[in-house]
Amino acid sequence: GTTLGAAAAEKGRYFGAAIPAFKLSDSQFVTILNREFNSVTAENEMKWDATEPQQGVFTYAGGDRILNHARSQGMSVRGHALLWHAQQPGWAQNMSGTALRNAAINHVTRVATYYRGKIHSWDVVNEAFADGGSGGRRDSNLQRTGNDWIEAAFRAARAADPGAKLCYNDYNTDGINAKSTGIYNMVRDFKARGVPIDCVGFQTHLGTTVPGDYQANLQRFADLGVDVQITELDIAQGSNQANAYAQVTRACLAVARCTGITVWGVRDSDSWRGNDNPLLFDRSGNKKPAYTATLDAL
Ligand code: XIL
């Protein structure tokens, strides 16, 4: 393959990018997107604050713009994210207890129902585990509604869109550590009890290096009977950037259940990471050494 998407497809994978709706009017951006990628994620447009700005009032304009562009180009869509402690609308931030639990599950049901049949994989729950050594849950208004909020969200998502792959997604989970092991134990428990979970997303926002046990970590999750996906890849610029991208790509290809890779933006100027220049295209839209290394690894 001569593009990321085509090369990944030859290996039975997708290669995606996160995109904001407003950049669909940037012709250089769209040229690269359409040429290189066969999957997209809405960078912000499908989050809770964007899709339910007032309780019970649902707005899908931004998400639909991205979805329609993707469909017109034959790209699949990752849904991101139904429930998260961040980017909640103000009304939800101020809720708690049963009222918040009911509102959260209603949100999952309504958004997943609206997009039923159009989303390849949903990040049903994003970033629910704590950093550091505890291996436990992150404190949040959602967590305070009861430890079963995650499984309730997955059951609601399955009922709303039985065809979507349902993922748990998080960061700092790229190597084998206390946080990734906490998630591993949750997934194992969900599989044992029949809670519907199909995939785990590894955001893979990296500094300059890839954890040595990155592939082994992906593999241990795959061995639980879930797909794994690299969902928000970006790696800080430095002398190792191209090599690190190749390492991540090779790790995914080496794990049969690693079904695709998404980079969190297209050009360095599109990145949420300011001056890290962590992406595959430079600020002028040129392919970087990291691009070539990734394509060569596919
Ligand atoms: C980021 C977006 O890129 C920014 O535009 C926004 O201001 C904040 O969120 N983990 C996630 C993503 O799951 O949703 C975040 O996206 C990056 C970290």
Image (cartoon, rainbow, N blue to C red):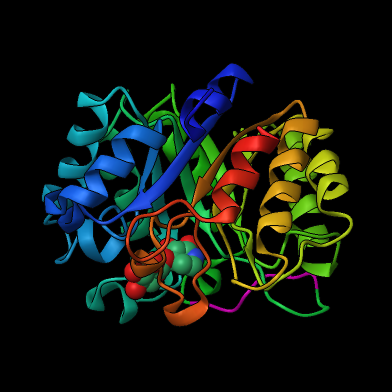
How far across and down, in percent of the image, does residue 121 sit? 47, 35
Q: Which residues are magenta?
A: 135-140
- Residue 37 image-quadrant placement: top left
SS majority, magenta: loop
Query: In what quadrant of the picture does the N terminus appear?
Result: top right
- Frontmost residue, 194 versus 1: 1
Q: Is residue 137 magenta?
A: yes
Indicate whether residue 82 is drawn in magenta.
Answer: no
Residue at the image position 73 percent from the left and 55 percent from the top: 243
Q: Would you say 213 lies left or right of 23 here?
A: right
Decide: is 93 above or below 75: below
Q: Position of residue 126 (x, y in %)?
A: 52, 59
- Indicate the position of residue 251 as horizontal and vertical percent values: 77, 41
Quadrant of residue 163 in the image? top left
Looking at this view, is 240 or 117 the one in front? 240
Is residue 88 depicted above or below 111 in this figure? below
Q: Residue at x 22, y 61 (%)?
A: 50
